[in-house]
Image (cartoon, rainbow, N blue to C red):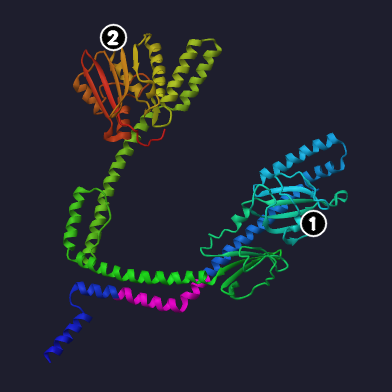
Amino acid sequence: MDRLSQFTQRARRMIMPTSLKRKLIHVLLLSTFIPLLLIGIISYTSMHAILETKITSGIHSNLKQVQVSMENVLGNLNYASQQLAFDGRVGKDIYAYMTNDHPYDRKILAGEIETEMNLLTSTNPNIGLMLYYDKDTNRILFPNLQVRDGFDPNQLPVFTKLTSMTYYGPHQTLNAQFDRTVMSITRKIDVPDLDQMYIYMETDNRLIDTVFNKLQYGMEVYHLIIDTDNRVAYSEKPASFPVGMKLAEQGGNGGKVAFGTQYMFEEASNQGWRVVAVIPMKSYKHEIFNWFLQFAAIAVLSLFVSFGFAWLIWRTVTRPLTRLNREIRSMTHNQSAGNIQLTGMDEFDYSLRRFHEMKGTVIQLIEDIKENERNKSRLEVEKMISQINPHFVHNTLDTIRWQARLNGQEDIDHLISTLNRVLHYNLGKGETASIREELEALKDYIALQEVRYQFHFDIRIAVEPDQLELRIPRFMLQPLVENALYHGIADDGFIMVDISEAAAGIRIEVSDNGAGMSPEEADRILQGDHSTHKQSGMGIGMPYVIRTLKYQYGDSAGIQIRSQSGEGTSIIITIPLPLPGKGE
């Protein structure tokens, strides 16, 4: 009795395990196996028909593409041959050529015909060989390519006939330079004097290979073309379906008809001809068999995945508090939200989600504060720039300049032109400019200052020619030079502008040998305190330079002032390379 009781308890534990690990394994296996079993039963009863319908629809869709492509080929042949017929531009020249007995006129007309046919060939890439020929004598006229010996269109397989045209099914090209399969057309030139003159035209040598593309089916397939007399005009499987074989129109469910060990699908054209796809039964059923193999492989894989998830969840549940603590600690070291790692337990997952949302909110608030600071700096810069109405100033200066030019005052004309260029550059759009543009604007600014003070300033510029196209923030050099002029230079003073490329980026140094400034005054300038100075000249001063560097580069750019009273001043700016993605 005790052994029976122990056995019963063991069986009960096997069916209804008490450990969390075993419960997870049983639940996941059942949740995986039962749906797979139900899907397998449903697949056995209905999926076969669904897959077969899908495959059949795909075959008919591909076959429809073949039919449409062939109709396009025939339509293109019809359109191109109209250009050679009597009512086309080439056909009229042919009539004039055949009915004219004067040798010189015939030579001129022959040249015009060849030119027109070459033009027709170049503008219709799907057209290959084309020519005129006399039906009684097979005399060939004006071929655009070399014709094979023994040219005789009467030997070609007739595809379909219309009033004055005959289409020929796929056959070997009559072009002597290639050996490919083409389709062709003959068209009669309906003129009483030329009642035996016909046009012969072929498709391009590779066009048929493109039309009968077997790769789109994804299985073994052969194409047949059935003409209007229900005979095979073209066959990719001549052993079973020779050309000329009588093949009546097929019926059947969904267009699929069994023919020996193969299935046949067809699409009919409005002109009466048909395109047939022949697929071996083994290849056709192989698609359905592959699905069942894939289903079985997925079922086995799903069972293994269930074991893996059971172990993973069991391992995760044993450490929920550790993971929550790790998530909290990561906030002090990682400023990005990242992906949350759930434990699988609702209570802990709720806490993790709330903490993750709080962490994302804090990070977003930090980013918003940074963005607001950047926008604030940009608005301050734009406010400083927009203090002058550019349109009013430019229009006024242009009026003065033209008035001076009319009065013959060339010096004033030159002065106003220079001033206008400086204003146009300083008030222009874009955040960056080339060093070359900055130097040209600086030279105009110095020219204005020399006129203003009636003094020639000694400005020395040092820069390598290969560095002139490097881009720096717009309107950098003028405020720096203006600052040097403001602090004053003696009669023998000079200003040095040194631009060079270093490992850290672009280094710009503007130095003078003027009066200089105290360290306290230099610190106030760097901190943006300009209450003790007034703006002068055309610039907007050092605040623009400092704020522009901070806005565009943040802490990546550097600016420092080296100066002592009576010994001159040097302002050094370092701009990183490459520049950030700022628009011009």
Question: Comparing marks 2 and 1, which lies closer to the viewer?
Answer: 1
> Nearest the camera: 338 or 38?
38
Residue linked to disc 2: 490
Q: Is residue 438 visible?
A: no
Counting from the top left corner in percent of width and height, residue 518 is at 20, 19
- Label 1: which secondary element: loop
Q: Is residue 170 left or right of residue 113?
A: left
Residue linked to disc 1: 164
Residue 561: within the magenta?
Answer: no
Classify 204 as above or below 509. Answer: below
Q: CA distance from mark 2 to mark 1?
A: 101 Å
Q: Earlier in the sequence, mark 2 or mark 1?
A: 1
Classify 108 as above or below 60. Answer: above
Q: Is residue 465 visible?
A: yes
Q: Main secondary structure of the magenta part?
A: helix
> Nearest the camera: 250 or 239?
239
> Mark 1: few, some, or many residues within 10 Å (few <14, many ≥20)?
few
> Nearest the camera: 59 or 151?
151
**Amino acid identity at mark 2:** Ala
**Amino acid identity at mark 1:** Ser
Counting from the top left corner in percent of width and height, residue 351 is at 22, 61
Classify 512 as above or below 315. Answer: above
Magenta residue span: 30-54
> Mark 2: few, some, or many residues within 10 Å (few <14, many ≥20)?
few
